[in-house]
Amino acid sequence: MLDAVTLRLTEGYAAAAPALNRALKMVLALDVSSGEAGYWLWLAGGRISQIIAMELWDFESWYALAVSQVQFSRERGALTHLTFALNYLARAHILAGELATAARLVEEDHLIAEATGKPPIAYTEMMLAAWRGQEQEASGLVEAISREAAARDVGRLASLTAYASSVLHNGLRQHDAACDAARLAFEREPMGLGSHIVPELAEAAARTGDVALVEAAMEWLSERTRVTPTEWVLGIEARALLCDGDAAESSYRESIERLGRTRVRAHLARAHLLYGEWLRRKRRRGEAREQLRTAYEMLDAMGIGAFAERARRELRATGETARKRTIEHTVELTAQEAQVAGLARDGLSNPEIGARLFISTRTVQYHLGKVFTKLGISSRSQLYRALAGDADTIPPRYPVGAAPPAARPETSCITAGSDGLSPEVGPRSLGIVPA
């Protein structure tokens, strides 16, 4: 892995892609049950292997590694590593359009922070707020984390704040601000973050008429598609093409088709939105309604608020009114109630839930009592139906009925701030560490 990363940083993407692919395959094939060597290799390489997967636009490998890292960290009791694993997995769920699951993972990070006395990691919470279109919360986190990044001269962290800012501003149709933020991140070219940053850059640059910047994004994407032509990167490249007329329509359709074969559903929904906006500008209102309706329904269901509102306004401009989603008898669970309810639904016992969330069995029972009252149910077996559509994809910490494994002491081999690239950085007052 280190050889492949070194090659990427010194020789560029095309030269390093074969080595990065080999390194990723080796990690995915690693047998962690083979003894201490396998254990430490897996734990130490967890984050860097996910960065490699993101660099290669390989969402499935990234997700598989993230899930495995969470499960492995739980089983070993490696709480510091678990906080990073939860945040990486939450980021994957955000791009998959599963923001409710991402929010639960962020909340679990907060619970661990409370239990251990360490600050939570802030950057995924910032990304989540940006994708939700929560302008005040996201802007506050971007500002705070940007100050911390500047004070400690951590370029990767600065790139993450710029990325979150570009998502927020694209959703709010503030494309000039989105373009400025995305350009800052793009110029740094942080490894593994291009798959996040470049879609924002291409959209913002196109909307502001910055042809040179769109061409730069296209050149960057083309270098990737030539050597690692995944459906994810090809889908993003198709919607970034500089063209009009029949060629533009073909590109939009190709983007939707390719992204539809991936789990990156947040960008699939946005591809429908961009195509619908283009159709409306071409005065093809009937066809535009179809795309915009699909985009609105997907984005609204995902909780991607600002982009959903953008789709709703575009749809209204075609003559169709889309109602904002309303739920009769809305039930508001607190963050911890939602955590407890989700784990109980997935079959964990009260002691198991307590071990997962670092709370007592009595506290678990207290929260479940409140959940039952709010949801109007009387047994755990009814939780699945009551919480339908919000399935947690995190594997249980250990099988139902089994005793929890003994926690394995953490050692300095996995430092609090290590991300495989910046070992000198650790959590600070804001819980800010580079991804």
Image (cartoon, rainbow, N blue to C red):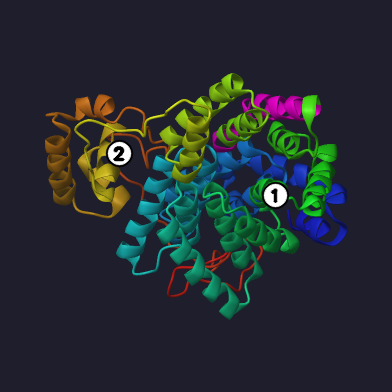
Q: Do the numbered discs 1 and 2 sit on residues whose CB atoms are within 8 Å? A: no
Name the residue located 67 percent from the left edge and 39 percent from the top edge: 58
Give the percent coordinates (x, y) of residue 214.
77, 49
Give the percent coordinates (x, y) of residue 398.
36, 40
Name the residue located 34 percent from the left edge and 66 percent from the top edge: 116
For label 1, count other residues whose C-alpha is less than 10 Å away and answer few (under 14), some (14-19) or many (20+): many
Q: Name the kind of residue labelled 2 in the image.
A: Leu
Label number found at residue 343? 2
User: Would you say residue 236 sits in the magenta stretch?
Assistant: no
In the picture, residue 100 is in which quadrant? Answer: top left
Q: How many marks?
A: 2
Left or right: 429 as drawn, with respect to 234: left
183 and 160: which one is in front?
Answer: 183
Q: Residue furthest top?
A: 286
The magenta segment is 247-268
Q: Mark 1 points at which residue?
A: 198
SS at badge 1: helix
SS at badge 2: helix
On-image quarter of the C terminus? bottom right
251 and 18: which one is in front?
Answer: 251
Give the percent coordinates (x, y) of residue 408.
42, 57
Label number found at residue 98? none
The majority secondary structure of the magenta stretch comes to: helix
**Mark earlier in primary sequence (1, 2):** 1
Is 141 located above or below residue 45 in the figure?
below
Is 346 located above or below residue 289 in the figure?
below
